[in-house]
Image: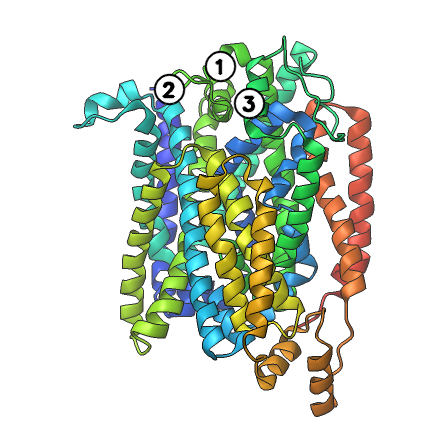
Amino acid sequence: MILSWIDVLVIVVYLALLVIIGIVQKKKAAANKEAYLLGGYKLPWYMLGLSNASGMFDISGTMWMVTLTFVYGMKSVWIPWLWPCFNQIFLMVYLSAWLRRSGVTTGAEWITFRFGKDKGAVWSHAIVVVFALISCFGFLAYGFVGLGKFVEIFLPWDVVAPYVPFHVAPEYVPHFYGILFTAFAVFYSIIGGMSSIVFADVLQYSIMTIAGLSVAVIAMMHLYSNGILNVPEGWMNPFFGMHLNMDWTGIIDEVNAKIASDGYELFGIFFMLMVFKGVLASLAGPAPSYDMQKILSAKSGREASLVSGFVNVVLFPTRYLMIIGFAVLGLLFYDQMNLQTLTGDIDFERILPAAIRQFVPVGLMGLLLAGLLSAFIGTFAGTLNAAQAYIINDIYLKYVNPKASNRSVITITYITGVVVVVISIILGIFAKDVNSVLQWLVSGLYGSYIAANVLKWHWWRFNGSGYFWGMLCGLIPALIFPSWIGGLDLYYWPWILLISTAGCIIGTYLAPATEPERLKDFYKKVRPWGAWGPVRKMAETEDASFRYQSTFKRDVVNIVVGIAWQVSLVIAPMYLVLMKGVPLAVSLALLVLTTWFLKKNWYDKLDKE
């Protein structure tokens, strides 16, 4: 057993606190559907922002990003644009406000608000539910795989095996641990609803901040005493050319194989594809997951914007202090780390847990492990809450039992939670590793989401039929291309985008436009910019008091500045830990300048609704 009794006690106490939060919030959550799924619209924006940031501070993602930083150095700051991480800037600037103004409970319910109740809208509603559930299952499986690999480091199988009454093959040990801790997460996430998730996430974020700062300090102390990192040329530089040109030969030869398997050698092409996809994905708005549910839980459109803006402030500096800290420790002491799996392969995703085991002191190790385990639980809980919202609100209450009592709704919510968890575990068992699940989620599945969800905001003629066929034409190849083509999923998503876009346009003109009253109601409430000229004229003709001045130009400027602001929030803590004075000063100057600009051109101009 790697952990001391003090560490075990810290973990047990912390997990007990999470259970207590769930139990305390259970009564509140049981009040009604909105209280369970959205916290009754009573949660303050800063708590929702902390909760959302905490949910993104997950084990699987952190392990993946530590690996990226270890391998690619400062160039790793661009690779999370695969999500894309800068979608939080689009949300902050305008999309969160647009989404919250709708006043709906889920993304599928939003479809009815946008397209009405004709046949195309009904089909669109159905396919959004399908997409939401598939993506939720994918994210749950993604967290499940990462959790198991993480726990395996601290609970060696040879210690646990004598107490397990059945044989577990070496390659399935992480999955066994994943199931074990998922069982605990199920109890916590199901009983308390959104309120307990938010309160627990705030507690978790506080602990993760302490842990992140501690890891950064430990790494800086070791780096100072060891002198210099032995890394390839270009590792310290975030800029790049068409080729990656990073050669680890003679330093850590195994990393070259990792780079080849990742498929990032043509970094310039990869970056251009990533930015193109990222901008379109960001224009599409949040996917139907925990991020969307936190935005819908805000009190107003203004507070929804503040939720997304606050995520950037509280997530990136703290997270990257921890990430660069672990990467530095991994580089300094690579020869002392055992990164081999039970099957004998080198797994760079084990750098984070191996560094915790070797360099984090007793007591703080327990705190850090508790926070990371809770990060899994928080991410798991938020995603599970989103899946439950779609099943209950958009299937059970819409088609099965529209007049269900509150007691029946809560009971069905518990049952669906367990079913969702079981399905996600099955999917997780068949997943190869964290990166394979991630690539499919962000490049394949989300490629199917982009076209229809960009057009739904920005083109008045786009209707429910176009949405359905666009999503369907994207979803089918997203599910089958991985088995047909293989390789880096980012390189086949343009084909998914083209197929999906064709489905959107053809489907739109196969059916009449959405009824005028529905379009006018949507436009007057949400106030989107884009190709809305005919609807705007109708709204202004019928209601002389309605006047809307488009914010398109200001929003675009704020997005560009906001992305630079977000990048500075990432690179500043990295250069701090690396103790690079000049790059740190430049990144801090960029941070101050962009913060001042956004204060004047974004924050001061937020709607006071």
> Which amino acid type corresponds to the residue marked 2 in the rendered image?
Ile
**Residue 210 picture location, percent across and down:** 55, 35
> Which amino acid type corresponds to the residue marked 3 in the rendered image?
Lys
Residue 258 badge: 3
The image quarter in which residue 532 lies = bottom right
**Which SS class for mark 2?**
loop
- CA separation in Å, label 2 and label 1: 14 Å
> Which amino acid type corresponds to the residue marked 1 in the rendered image?
Met
Residue at which label 2 appears: 2
* Residue beneath the point at 79% across and 29% down: 583
Residue at which label 1 appears: 337
* Residue beneath the point at 35% across and 30% down: 174
Sequence-first disc among 3 and 2: 2
Residue 396 badge: none
- CA separation in Å, label 3 and label 2: 28 Å
Against 73, is 31 above or below? below
Q: Is residue 275 visible?
A: yes
Which corner quadrant holds the C terminus? bottom right
